[in-house]
RNA sequence: GCGGCCAUGGUGUAACGGUUAACACAGGAGAUUGUGGCUCUCCUGAUCCGGGUUCAAUUCCCGGUGGUCGCCCCA
């Protein structure tokens, strides 16, 4: 596969900065003795963690495919107003968590804090309304929010998202919830599905007015935080953690009572579909979501057990957003979707010691003595690779002993030993690492011999995440 | 953005304000010539950064940075 036709040109503005590069912020004093440092809230996902990450990503991909969602890759950078318009002006995400900056062409851009808006943008931009509806898309990738880091919360985090455009059918909502649940099931995580409806913007307005006036009577009893919420974002009162507020909530108006007939009907149908597939859910009249674009159904996946209600126990969520496409300039298009936080899911897996199915990284190890053996080894390597056998080595080491140590640590089943003598004889030694038994084999036959020996052991997979299995 | 707690080799820990900052694991080299899993020897390697107090700071104080927990909010 060739890369781009042209070699990458340095498109950068070659404006030479007169001074030191790093000096321009006040970075210089922060960073310690020149050692490179991770930006706060950012992290490296190390090789050891990739097994779990792959496990999660694979599960998502195969679920997406089996529900016939089409993959879409969306840019990480978008014009900042896309998010300003969609997420809601007053929301924290927009107000204080977005990475917004001016790009070299003096345009205000933002690192995406989520991708639903991008998906909607793509839907409009590529005229997907002309495709058979609904259009079902899924994506996966990093999102960015400049929030205060905490366990399970990073400034760069990964989400997978499923979005369905062009259908207002309640079955879509239900199916999305089902898919989300299936993903967790596949991974072995027990989540509870919280669900609620916030109706149309109109009935939400009406409800809000009612809610505000209800709480106004008790204003003096409200804790500071909740007084602020009452002003700024009254819906948030619903999931307040303050005991006093929780008490007051008992007699507070319920949003479900304020839904118009259509909204009510929609919601009832969603629930019926869920019942139909015997999918348990928790009706949570206090569930509200942080982004403005939601309408009707909203839902969240939360970690089922540890009732201790850990802070970051929401592993994902979503809902219907019928007004979003129109809001950013498309034709009115009903839509619904959800996103899952991969970081949190991976964390949940490791908290619960759920290990991904193990794939042997290497089946056999190649130990060599001397340059002649190395040369032969290089060729042998390719032959093994062609037959799908993964061969590991430690050509950086000379002593056979050291190489066997590595082989042992890798846990391979067989080690091939090739020394001067074998090279001359055209043979190679195969050593069973379990028993220590060795035999000398014609080097020409070694690939088929190894193939046969590996076959005998059903525990060894000849294809793990083999690229052939892809696509 | 606010508050609490924390910061020692790659990892996990230790060190009354006082020598060469200790231990385990991991890593490297070796224990007769070309054979792993046990054992043994040796080696590499750290006090987050910047100030201050002090004769003396890993230790005390302040600031920064980072982590963590709670709040805000969210995935």
Image (tube, coloured by chain):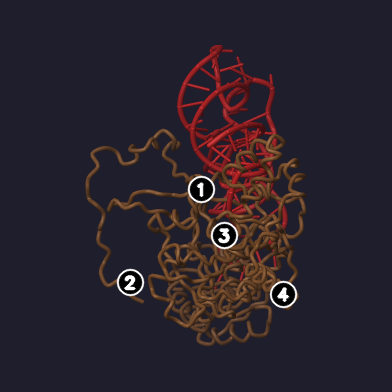
Chain colours: A brown, B red
Upstream in sequence: badge 4 or badge 3: 3
**Residue hosting label 3:** A202
Q: Which chain does tag 1 point to? A: A
Disc 2 and disc 1 on one polypeptide chain: yes
Q: Is residue A74 above or below residue A380?
A: above
The local secondary structure at tag 2 comes to loop
Upstream in sequence: badge 1 or badge 4: 1
Residue A172 placement: quadrant: bottom right
Q: Which disc is residue A272 wearing? A: 4
What whole-number distance in Å separates the C-alpha atoms at marks 1 and 4?
A: 34 Å
- Closer to us: mark 4 or mark 3? 3
- Closer to us: mark 3 or mark 2? 3
Compared across the picture, whether B25 is left or right of A133 comes to: right
**Residue hosting label 2:** A3
Compared across the picture, whether A233 is left or right of A97 comes to: right
Residue A449 placement: quadrant: bottom right
Q: Quadrant of the N terminus of chain A?
A: bottom left
Q: Which disc is residue A90 wearing? A: 1
Disc 3 and disc 2 on one polypeptide chain: yes
- Closer to us: mark 1 or mark 3? 3
Upstream in sequence: badge 1 or badge 3: 1
Badge 4 vs badge 3, beta-carbon distance below 8 Å: no
Upstream in sequence: badge 2 or badge 4: 2
Compared across the picture, whether A232 is left or right of A210 comes to: left
């Amino acid at each position: 596969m060739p890369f781009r036709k042209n070699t990458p040109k340095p498109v950068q503005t070659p404006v030479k900065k007169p001074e030191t590069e790093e000096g321009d912020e006040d970075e210089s004093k922060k960073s310690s003795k020149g050692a490179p440092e991770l930006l706060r809230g950012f992290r490296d996902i190390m090789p050891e963690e990739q097994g779990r990450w792959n496990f999660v990503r694979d599960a998502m991909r195969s679920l997406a495919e089996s529900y016939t969602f089409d993959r879409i890759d969306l840019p990480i950078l978008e014009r900042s107003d896309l998010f300003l318009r969609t997420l809601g002006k007053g929301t924290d995400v927009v107000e204080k968590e977005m990475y917004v900056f001016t790009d070299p062409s003096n345009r205000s851009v933002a690192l995406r804090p989520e991708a639903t808006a991008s998906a909607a943008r793509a839907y409009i931009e590529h005229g997907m309304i002309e495709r058979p509806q609904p259009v079902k898309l899924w994506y996966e990738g990093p999102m960015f929010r400049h929030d205060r880091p905490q366990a399970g919360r990073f400034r760069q985090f990964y989400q997978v998202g499923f979005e369905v455009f062009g259908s207002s059918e309640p079955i879509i909502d239900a199916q999305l919830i089902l898919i989300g649940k299936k993903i967790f099931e596949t991974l072995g995580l027990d989540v509870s599905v919280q669900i609620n409806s916030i109706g149309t913007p109109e009935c939400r307005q009406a409800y809000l007015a009612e809610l505000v006036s209800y709480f106004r009577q008790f204003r003096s009893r409200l804790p500071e935080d909740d007084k602020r919420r009452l002003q700024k974002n009254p819906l948030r009162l619903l999931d307040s953690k303050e005991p006093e507020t929780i008490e007051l909530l008992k007699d507070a108006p319920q949003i479900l009572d304020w839904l118009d007939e259509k909204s009510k009907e929609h919601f009832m149908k969603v629930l019926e579909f869920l019942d139909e597939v015997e999918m348990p859910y928790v009706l949570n009249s206090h569930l509200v979501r942080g982004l403005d674009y939601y309408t009707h159904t909203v839902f969240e996946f939360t970690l089922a057990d540890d009732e201790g209600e850990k802070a970051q126990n929401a592993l994902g969520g979503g809902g219907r957003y019928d007004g979003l496409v129109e809001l950013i300039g498309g034709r009115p298009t009903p839509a619904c979707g959800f996103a899952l936080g991969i970081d949190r899911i991976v964390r949940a897996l490791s908290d619960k010691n759920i290990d991904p199915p193990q794939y042997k990284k290497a089946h056999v190890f190649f130990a060599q003595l001397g340059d002649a053996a190395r040369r032969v080894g290089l060729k042998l390597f390719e032959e093994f690779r062609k037959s799908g056998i993964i061969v590991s080595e430690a050509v950086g080491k000379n002593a056979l002993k050291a190489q066997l140590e590595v082989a042992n640590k890798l846990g391979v089943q067989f080690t091939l030993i090739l020394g001067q003598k074998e090279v001359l004889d055209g043979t190679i030694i195969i050593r069973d690492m379990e028993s220590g038994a060795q035999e000398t084999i014609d080097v020409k036959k070694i690939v088929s011999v190894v193939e046969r020996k590996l076959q005998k052991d059903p525990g060894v997979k000849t294809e793990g995440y083999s690229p052939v299995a892809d696509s």
